[in-house]
Image (spheres, grey):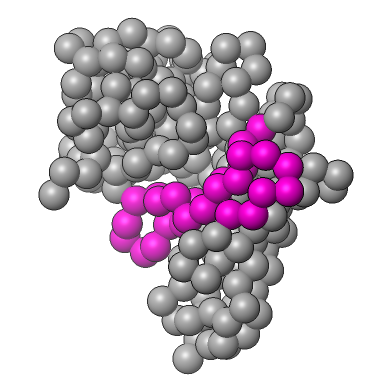
């Protein structure tokens, strides 16, 4: 079945460091790809998305590019802030076989120190 | 606040007891999803509704689990004869129209089975 694999965490960075969180996927058909974020004590919220190959999703300084050739959707940010500390989930959705649901990776916990 | 609300936020119960969780989605959203999240894992799909119709159920949803959305508005998730393995965070999410993967999540209901 469809699945998402994220890099293992936790990730600890200093403020203003460069962030990459790797995500690869396995899916039949052409999935849409997402990054969700869960801040401490809050519900998951959509961070960014890309619906087709070579699309770049971006929001709040984060970016991810849909790479069909490498089945990847890595999350990047050039300069992280303490407020970016959260758990980040890569996810995909397909509509194969009439099923429409988000499939999530295990999550990567990011801690940014001042 | 007109986000997704879940109740109760925390539930502690003894093994063998029944528990029920309620979810109130964003009012204009016709799709409602239940996910389960355990420590260190991403959310796992349980079931979803379009209006009052339950369109898909995961194999994770054993016979002890039942979900309803009687009037296409709020939903309940009941777990009968709880087991320690049911301890998890139960997440509700809603969306409008065709599923684009953009789900709005509540803060979750944490279940602890002793």
Name the residue at the bottom extreme.
Answer: A114
Residue B96 lies, with reference to residue B111, above or below; the image says above
Residue at point 13%, 49% (across, down): B1
Residue B109, given in percent of the width and then of the height, sits at 29, 41
Q: Is residue B111 magenta?
A: no
Residue at point 43%, 23% (across, down): B98
Please state which of residues B10 and A103 is positioned toward the viewer in this rendering: A103
Position of B2 compared to A39: left or right? left
Residue A105, given in percent of the width and then of the height, sits at 61, 45
Q: Is residue A51 magenta?
A: yes
Residue B3, given in percent of the width and then of the height, sits at 22, 44
Residue A35, given in percent of the width and then of the height, sits at 55, 51
Please state which of residues A58 and B85 is positioned toward the viewer in this rendering: A58
Range drawn in magenta: A31-57
Residue B50 lies, with reference to residue B108, above or below; the image says above
Visible residue check, residue A89: no
Please state which of residues B74 and B67 is positioned toward the viewer in this rendering: B74
């Amino acid at each position: 079945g469809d699945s998402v694999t994220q890099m293992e965490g936790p990730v600890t960075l200093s403020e203003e460091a460069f962030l990459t969180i790797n995500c690869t996927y396995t899916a039949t058909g052409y999935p849409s790809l997402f990054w969700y974020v869960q801040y401490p004590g809050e519900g998951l919220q959509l961070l960014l998305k890309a619906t087709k190959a070579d699309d770049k999703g971006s929001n709040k300084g984060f970016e991810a590019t849909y790479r069909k050739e490498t089945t990847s959707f890595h999350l990047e940010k050039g300069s992280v802030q303490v407020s970016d500390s959260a758990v980040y989930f890569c996810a995909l959705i397909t509509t194969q076989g009439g099923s429409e649901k988000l499939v999530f990776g295990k999550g990567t916990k990011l801690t940014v120190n001042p | 606040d007109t986000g997704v609300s879940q109740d109760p936020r925390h539930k502690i119960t003894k093994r063998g007891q029944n528990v029920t969780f309620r979810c109130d989605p964003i009012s204009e959203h016709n799709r409602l999803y239940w996910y389960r999240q355990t420590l260190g894992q991403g959310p796992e799909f349980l079931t979803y509704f379009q209006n009052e119709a339950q369109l898909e159920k995961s194999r994770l949803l054993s016979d002890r689990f039942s979900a309803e959305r009687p009037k296409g508005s709020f939903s309940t998730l009941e777990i009968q004869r709880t087991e320690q393995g049911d301890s998890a965070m139960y997440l509700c999410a809603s969306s409008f129209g065709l599923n684009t993967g953009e789900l709005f999540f509540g803060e979750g209901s944490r279940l602890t089975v002793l």
